[in-house]
Image: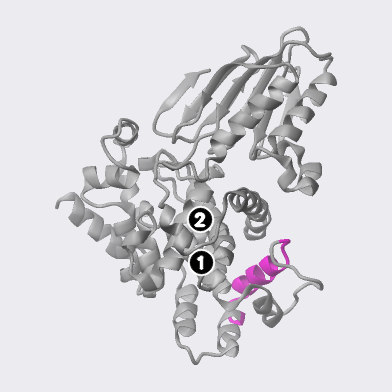
Amino acid sequence: MNVLECIARRVEEKPLPSRIAFELLHIIEDENHSLKQIIALVENDAALTTEVLKLANTAAYRRGEPASTLSRAMLLMGEMMVVGVAICASSSIIFNCPLNGYDSSADEMFDHSLRSAIAAREVARFARKKINPGLAFTAGLLHDIGKTVISEFLEGRTMELTKACEEGEVADYLQAEKSVLGTDHADVGFMLARQWHLPDTLAFAIRDHHQPASTEEAYRTLVYTIHLADLISMMGGAGTGADSLAYTLDERYEEYLEVGKDDFAILLMKVQEDFVSIKQSFS
Amino acid sequence: MEIVYVGVGEYATTQGETGFMKTLALGSCVAVIVLDPDHRCLGLLHVALPDSTINQKRALERPGMFADTGIAKLLESLEAHGYEGGQLTVKLAGGASIMDPNHTFDIGNRNVLAIRKCLWKHKLGSIAEDVGGNISRSVSIDLGGRTVVVSSPGRGEWVL
């Protein structure tokens, strides 16, 4: 079996990270769904209900009186955000493993994903065409999911890849991955998204977050949001090891997002603050 | 062996002779390491942003977040250990960036420039720097040998 076949096998073996998150996604995809359907599903899961209420009462979401009911919590954070909470609540299944191929420890993948999710939710506010901040949060959480599959195939080659980037042999770390494996974390993430029947919006955000211009026009606002959120997360110090910062900013983001230089500094600070309070709520 | 971790926007000073002081995953942030040889005291600051004017309320709550307020607080903290002004050994690490050909979001470089400017105001300058580029660095200071080691995933470690 060659490397690509082994990777495809690993993708098939990867468990669905959170059944309830994906049930929620499918309900939300139906335009005629009601909030009652969401609440009914969430209240059947005591652990998820607790997580949703905890998050709604963090500094990042709380407005006025404490949220003590699911409907109040949903009002504060939006129904798509509950999908993100469900994925975070099951984070040990997909995130909490060391990425040895990236020289990255067990908690770095979750920290990077959560920071990217928070950054995506914040960047979404700057979108020229409105996008759902909860959807941006969920896409931010999942954008690097392909790394959890390809990491093992990069073990022992990390220095080779960082050297190739530093000496300009490849344009970025994505190309470095492709040069040794024939695929990269974005494409493998897309395979996982398809395997899990994720909606196209999330699947394309995962596949194109380093090459946002290549995605279909209809998805570009979200994909550029994730592109920028990923870079903000890395600049804030939360990468996934050897590939941190080894990616290029696509400046065409300006066509989709009104983020200026000063906004960027404020975003960095906001993400740092919300990360501390939201991570505490999940721990 | 005691290890003191300095988080984003935090600073710490010590006269300790054993243990380590560390700050991790700097990204575009900058670690400012200062050593007062006369009083054997050492300080470490993790700066995230160049200028406190973007949020003065935050600067009051967490002065270490910004270059201007962070350097001032770090020096104040050294004074508690006997520092009375004058020369310090200063080293800088971090200030990296994504690949950003037009320097649109070059916070790392702006952080380094702002820190150098603040140091000059206090008649200080760095004797060693490992800044810029597209790599995330961590810093570890061995309090026994007063050595500063920089590391980066997939690249190993080196003495600054």
- Residue A109 seen in the current view: yes
Residue A43: x and y in percent read: 62, 81
Circle 2 sits in a helix, a strand or a loop, which is it?
helix
Residue at image location 52% in from the left, 40% down from the top? B106
Residue at image location 24% in from the left, 52% down from the top? A183
How would you rate the neighbour count of disc 2 (Cα within 10 Å): few for under 14, some for 14-19, many for 20 or more? Answer: many
Residue A247: x and y in percent read: 39, 45
The amino acid type of the residue labelled 2 equals Ala
Q: Nearer the viewer, residue A72 or B51?
A: B51
Asked whether residue A10 is drawn in magenta, I would say: no
Q: Nearer the viewer, residue A14 or A211?
A: A211
Q: Is residue B122 left or right of residue A179?
A: right
Q: Are marks 1 and 2 on the same chain?
A: yes
The amino acid type of the residue labelled 1 equals Ala
Residue range in magenta is A43-59
Residue A264: x and y in percent read: 58, 51
Q: Is residue A3 above or below residue A117?
A: above
Chain containing the residue with disc 2: A
- Circles 1 and 2, Cβ within 8 Å, touching? The answer is yes
User: In this figure, which residue is indicated by the disc labeled 2?
Assistant: A229
User: In this figure, which residue is indicated by the disc labeled 1?
Assistant: A136
Q: Is residue A243 left or right of residue B151?
A: left
Q: Quadrant of residue A205?
A: bottom left
